[in-house]
Amino acid sequence: MRRGMLELCLIIIVVIGIHAERLMHNGSIEGRISPAKASQSVIAVRGNDSVKVTSNDGHFGMELQPGEWNLIFAVNEYNGFHGMKTVKIQEGKHVNLGEIKLSQ
């Protein structure tokens, strides 16, 4: 019984370690959409992988794996997309995109 509990604890520690290692290799981006109400959703796409966040009063941020990502800004008025911005994410780096002006 004790050996089984010890093995279970070791497995849990290994799984946590693997996830922590993976998260340490991610990068992050942030930016501000102008006008703030133009887009509520920002979608990052790379191959078959995608991450979607909602902007908070125009501000957005997300953690992404290293690589080249396309950011898509969903335009509220037309229920469509404004366009894409390509961003290169490097391991452990933070990218501030600053102000992103969207035309309505």
Image: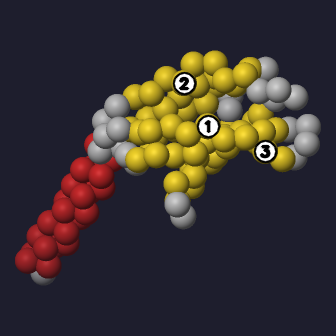
Query: On screen, 88 above or below 1?
Result: above
Query: Does residue 57 appear anywhere in the picture?
Result: no
Quarter of the figure with the N terminus: bottom left
Hey, which residue is sitting farthest left in the picture?
A: 3
**What is the CA distance from the residue labelled 3 to the residue labelled 1?**
12 Å
Q: Which residue is tagged 1?
A: 85
Q: Which residue is tagged 2?
A: 97
Q: Are marks 1 and 2 in contact (CB under 8 Å)?
A: yes
Q: Earlier in the sequence, mark 3 or mark 2?
A: 3
- Kindly state the secondary structure of the residue where label 2 is placed: strand
Query: On screen, 17 above or below 102?
Result: below
Residue 81 in the image: state x and y as whole percent: 78, 44
Q: Which residue is tagged 3?
A: 81
What's the residue type where badge 2 is placed?
A: Leu
Residue 6 in the image: state x and y as whole percent: 11, 70
Residue 77 in the image: state x and y as whole percent: 91, 37
Q: Earlier in the sequence, mark 1 or mark 2?
A: 1
The residue depicted at 52 percent of the width and 60 percent of the height is 47
Question: Is residue 3 or residue 65 the one in the foreground?
Answer: 65
The residue depicted at 8 percent of the width and 77 percent of the height is 3
Is 66 positioned to the left or the right of 31 in the image?
A: left
